Amino acid sequence: MIGGIARHLAGAGSVWLRNATVWRATWKTSLVGAVGEPLFYLLGLGYGLGTIIPAVADRPYLHFVAPGLMITSVMYSTTIEATYMTFTKTEHQKVYASMILSPLTFADIILGEVLWIVTKGLISGGTILAVVLATGIAPVWPGLLGVPLILLAGFIFASLGMIVTSVARSYDSFNYYFTLVIAPMFFFSGIFFPTERLGSWVGRFTQIFPLTHLAVISRGILGGAMDGAFLRSLMVAALFAAAGFAIATARMQRRFMP
Amino acid sequence: MPRGGVSATPQMGVFQQPAVSLRAVSRRFGDAWAVRDVSLDIERGSCFGLLGPNGAGKTTTLKMIYGFLRPTSGAIVVDGADIALDPAGARASMGIVPQEDLLDPDLDVTRNLEFHARYYRIPRARAILKCRDLLSDMGLEGYDGRPVSHLSTGLRRRLVLARALLNDPAIVILDEPTRGLDRKSRGRYIDKLLHLKAAGATLILATHDLEKAGLLCDRAALMDSGRIRALGTLPEVLEAGAGLAPASSPGDEPR
């Protein structure tokens, strides 16, 4: 049992290392997008728009929007990696098919990929978190709990993206996911305004989005409101992570080892 | 002459486990059967040929042996491990040369080998030495830092064989291994396979090149439409399947 888990982790680790080695060759270019874009969002929305918007939920708009922006940066970076990049690796580069010519299993490969995608999310989300903590938008403690939150968010969106990739026929398939799922989540998950403003039934509908719960958790950690809603959202997010990863592994295996 | 569904090696000792054993293996894609009721025992240290025209089911059979495809029904045991239950254990004793090269395009020649060694959990120091030896053995010295996309077809096929030999496999699966090679390169490649066979490895070779099969195979199965039509030594198979055997000339390599 323990030996099996150790082999699984070692296999996933070798996949992670392969991706890190490939990334190292283009890390400067990758960092521009991964770090630059979320920072501009924070500057534009927080420091720009924030100057003309009055306090939201009893706090300056910058303090309201920053925790959500941290999570959306994780969502976008991990979703792009789990969809377009993963599709390229599987369909065009046949990287997974190459790996499977060894004792690696599909479960090793998928776990390694998800951990790598989570790492990319950590780079994006971690940049925002560093700025938030460095500028005093949130205190360092418990603000540092933002790191495990970023990992959790990355795990969720990597798994969801992989599920979409497992049924994608071409790159165009991802348009549906980005337009019909990711974009509504971005706008209606309580990142820019409280979901209560949406009215009762729309507000309740937004509870099906993982981003809604992750925003609640993020605001709880960075804004110091770890209450009942925080704990409820934490449990929902954990469920999304567990179910998402299990489904992603099964679906990807079904697609690539029919 | 044994037919499909019958053991290939009735004379094999009771206590010697076959290298690979297939029992009533079938595989369906939609409504079409790619492989139908194939049973085989492949003796250790032998070279077994899967012969037949394109679409006969050779590649599908090999993919099921190395666990890339799941059989619709039947069981496959490789070196004592059931491929469905323990794919990692089964592949640990295998080296695989697929029909497509399946090299990692993001990694250079050396890194392709080094990462594959890592997937096999070969200790780093040993892997570095092994990679160097194999690159030299395959005539790939000087190409170590090159992207694999810059290699010719022949060099890529040699690199794929080097990758398959990283773990000193007991069983080597070869799916049209000399595809795309010129006569000289093919000769060197076959010499390497003969050397492996002499060293005691079990070779399982899918081809429709009868000259190559004649040089290497102790026993063979002739497949057609997913079924084994003839099974035995190469002359027996060719005689039994005269009407079915692929009439390939030595230079008639599949693309």
Image: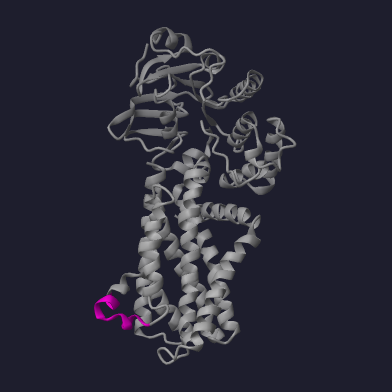
Compare residues A201 and B225 and report the one nearer the observer: A201
Is residue B21 toward the left or the right of residue B133 in the image?
Answer: left
- Name the spot of residue B245 as percent of width and height, x first: 42, 12
Q: Is residue B93 visible?
A: yes
- Name the spot of residue A176 as percent of width and height, x first: 37, 57
The image quadrant that residue A201 belongs to is bottom left
Is residue A28 toward the left or the right of residue A46 in the image?
Answer: right
Query: Residue at the spot x=71%, y=43% of the render?
Result: B145
Query: Residue at the spot x=62%, y=39% of the render?
Result: B149
Is residue B180 toward the left or the right of residue B85 in the image?
Answer: right
- Name the spot of residue A74 as percent of width and height, x first: 49, 68
Q: Is residue A167 above or below residue B193?
A: below
Compare residues A257 and B218 and report the one nearer the observer: A257
Please identify the residue farthest to the left as the structure is shown.
Answer: A201
Q: Is residue B187 above or below residue A175?
A: above
- Name the spot of residue B77 as percent of width and height, x first: 41, 34
The N terminus of chain A sits in image quarter: bottom left
Query: Residue at the spot x=36%, y=64% of the render?
Result: A181
Q: Is residue B249 above or below residue B45?
A: above
Magenta-highlighted residues: A194-204
Please identify the residue farthest to the right as the structure is shown.
Answer: B142
Q: How is the image coloured?
A: one colour
Q: How many marks?
A: 0
The stretch drawn in magenta includes residue A41: no
Q: Majority secondary structure of the magenta segment? A: helix
Please identify the residue farthest to the front as the structure is shown.
Answer: A52
Q: Is residue A4 visible?
A: no
The C terminus of chain A sits in image quarter: top left
